Amino acid sequence: MKTVTKKINPTCGGVLTDRIVVNEQPLDREKITVMDPQKFAIAIMAAGKGTRLKSRRPKVLHEIGGRALLLHVIAAALKIVPSDRIYCIIGHEADRVRAAVESTGVQFVLQPEQRGTGHAMQMIKAFFALSGDAIPENLLVLSGDVPLIRPETIASICETHLREQAAMTILTAVPDDPTGYGRVLRVAPASPEVTAIVEQRSLAPHQLATPEINSGIYCFRTAALFDKLDQLDTNNAHGEFYLTDVAAMLVAGGQRVVAVQAESVNEVLGANTIAEMMHLDAAMRLNTAHRLMAQGVTIFRPDTAVIDAEVEVGADTVIEPYVQLLGATRIGSNCRIRSYSVIQNSIIGDEVTVRNGCIMDSATIAAGAILGPYSHLRPESDIGAGAHIGNFVETKKVSIGAGSKANHLNYLGDAVIGSGVNIGAGVITCNYDGVHKHRTTIGDDVFVGSDSTLVAPVTLEDDSYVAAGSCITDDVPSGSLALGRSRQVIKAGWVADRRESTETGKR
Ligand code: UD1
Ligand code: CA
């Protein structure tokens, strides 16, 4: 692995200018070796509370790039060993953490009290003794709060570990500012061999300048690790069992401990505070933006784009500044997504225009549609090809046929609307009677005049017309006009009469 020189500055106002290598890069499959599950298992430490976050949510469930920290780590681990060889150590809010990640199929090991990373490993040792699971020859240890780790790097630690015939292999990095991390002391600067890991608060004055940090990611020969765990103590600044103390213990026992530097510093950055978390979030999202740009998407000001890791966008689509694309959103080719739109779990076809400020959740938009500005498409909105949904229009559970238009100030809910329909300004479906929801059905080529209310359940058949200002409570047959309002009355001379009567005090 090579030494890294990439710099990112966590205090630069959120604008990250460097291309950052994180685990959303397309995988370099040639560099990933799937490990023999007899020889390797993976433990993920995820029991800690995350005191420094000052949050009620367990640290490993905080999200970056739209996904929990722990899920990022599990995703990387799953590329290396099968899920039943991944052991997740949980403790603080264990039920909540388990529920959030159990669909991945990993195993769980409970650490009821969180007495440190060394104690977490004691739990793993006890779990193997009790469960009868085959003890792997080597145990790879990941931290649930180091989320950008790539599978390539994990595989490479395993390989180095085997090649070096080490008892412990430590993944390290040299960040701009090592403060807060444990430091790795090498036998000599160029030597792969390590003498100890020293935690920040235990650094002697002459060690404070040590630049190389411990990432909290290691590979152990399992027997060597398990042999030392019972000898750990809590005589340290935190009063905890430090897994990091195992390094010096192994060296004292004549065993080989080596360090290997990560290719990217970012990959091993921990997330102990919200600020660190948001730094990683920005890094990951910027990387997603770069992935999309490499596939032909134009993103103005990519540093302002909030794009979740799984989002897909077709070539020649243009994304303006300050757009959010979230969840499982997929956008076609040749679209334009204008500023301040927030699109979540939605499917958008080719050549769609989303004007400024649209909000979309679980909507489906067919090719050539034009939305916004300021349309609000709620779940199960299905917008047909070439349809127009305009200013301040809210839709919910509605399908709107090809070429239909609802351009101004509408609420359309629980409705099926055909093709070629014109919904006038201010038209609403009255879908709710206070107890139940009812459906409005509108055929093809219907014209609904402005400011009409359609009281569901009601059907407007094909080719029907509704006069402006109508309150429609009965079905409208095909080809007919419905007027649902009182006739206009003209009172000639009324204004002058009124003026006279108020002036004379008569009424
Ligand atoms: C740890 C390392 C430090 C390293 C840093 C890298 C130790 C003593 N120190 O410090 O050398 O530079 O990671 O990020 O290991 N956890 C448990 N059970 C516990 C305590 C922690 O599962 O009892 C989990 C946490 O949920 C977390 C991980 O272990 O995911 C690391 O714990 P944390 O308290 O964040 O350690 P650091 O202080 O960051
Ligand atoms: Ca940490």
Image (cartoon, grey):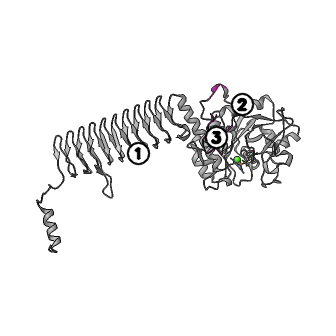
- Cβ–Cβ under 8 Å for marks 3 and 2: no
Q: Residue at x 78, y 48 (%)?
A: 200
- Quarter of the view holding residue 4: top right
Task: Tell me if residue 316 comes above or below residue 455 in the rendering.
Answer: above
What type is the residue that disc 2 sits on?
A: Ser
Q: Quadrant of the C terminus?
A: bottom left
Where is residue 217 shown, x and y percent of the image?
A: 72, 40
- Quarter of the view holding residue 291: top right
The residue that mark 2 highlights is 156
What type is the residue that disc 1 sits on?
A: Pro
Residue 17 on the magenta span: yes
Give the magenta part as a residue range.
Answer: 1-30
**Image mark for residue 73:** 3
The residue that mark 1 highlights is 379
Horizontal placement of 315 versus 85: left or right?
A: left
Residue 277 on the magenta span: no
**Label 1 vs 3, first from the N-terminus:** 3
Where is residue 150 shown, x and y percent of the image?
A: 65, 35
Q: Residue at x 41, y 45 (%)?
A: 379
Q: Quadrant of the N terminus?
A: top right
**Image mark for residue 284:** none
Around disc 1, counting alpha carbons within 10 Å, would you say few (fewer than 14), some (14 to 19), or many (20 or more)?
some
Horizontal placement of 445 versus 4: left or right?
A: left
